[in-house]
Image (tube, rainbow, N blue to C red):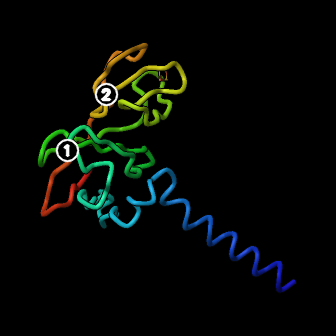
Amino acid sequence: MENLSRRAVLTGACAILTMGFVNIPSAANASVKRLSDGRLSVRVKSIPELASIGGAVQIGKLKGTPVGLARTGDTKYVAFSLACPHQGVKVVKSENGWVCPAHQSEFESDGDLLLGPATSRLTRIPVRLRGGNAVIG
Ligand code: FES
């Protein structure tokens, strides 16, 4: 009985720890904090995928929606929803940007549309750079 309880506790603890970081690269975990108002604060210099212009990474979720962050300049970043504008399926990282696994719409690393059936880019989310942190939301 005691072993079963210990297993249940450990399984539950692992599930809780995993829930907040699903699909966030391990390098990004320590660099992403959720602020008290729900926005995400990202220490961009600590994320290897954002080391160069054109780099992009899934960074976490805002209000249940997966969020991508891309570097577009020396000190410029854009954030966007990873929900495909066609039918809402979550896009995934591809070699040159993002691709939707449902109907193969393709997007550039900054979320701009490359190929339909989607007819618009990934929905932008406000992002501000503050002291080396990108505050998203
Ligand atoms: S849901 Fe993404 S292309 Fe259809």
> Image check: 21 left or right of 59?
right
The x and y percentages for residue 116 are: 40, 14
Residue pushed farthest right?
1
Residue 43 sits in quarter: bottom left
The x and y percentages for residue 22 are: 51, 54
Answer few, some or many: residues within 10 Å of disc 1's Cα (few below 14, many 20 plus, some between 14 and 19): many
Which label's residue is closer to the chain start, 2 or 1? 1
The x and y percentages for residue 89 are: 50, 30
* Residue at the (12%, 49%) spot, across then down: 75
> Image check: 123 left or right of 16?
left
Tell how many labels: 2
Contact check, label 2 and label 1, Cβ < 8 Å? no
Residue designated by label 2: 108
* Residue at the (25%, 50%) spot, across then down: 51
Answer few, some or many: residues within 10 Å of disc 2's Cα (few below 14, many 20 plus, some between 14 and 19): many
Look at label 1 and name its amino acid. Answer: Tyr
* Residue at the (52%, 18%) spot, across then down: 103
Q: Is residue 117 above or below residue 9?
A: above
Measured Cα–Cα span from mark 2 to mark 1: 14 Å
Residue pushed farthest bottom?
2
The x and y percentages for residue 83 are: 43, 34
SS class, disc 2: strand
Q: Which mark is residue 77?
A: 1
**Is label 1 within 8 A of ligand 1 (CB to nearest ligand atom)?**
no
Look at label 2 and name its amino acid. Answer: Glu
* Residue at the (54%, 67%) spot, across then down: 17
SS class, disc 1: strand
Q: Is residue 42 above or below residue 118?
A: below
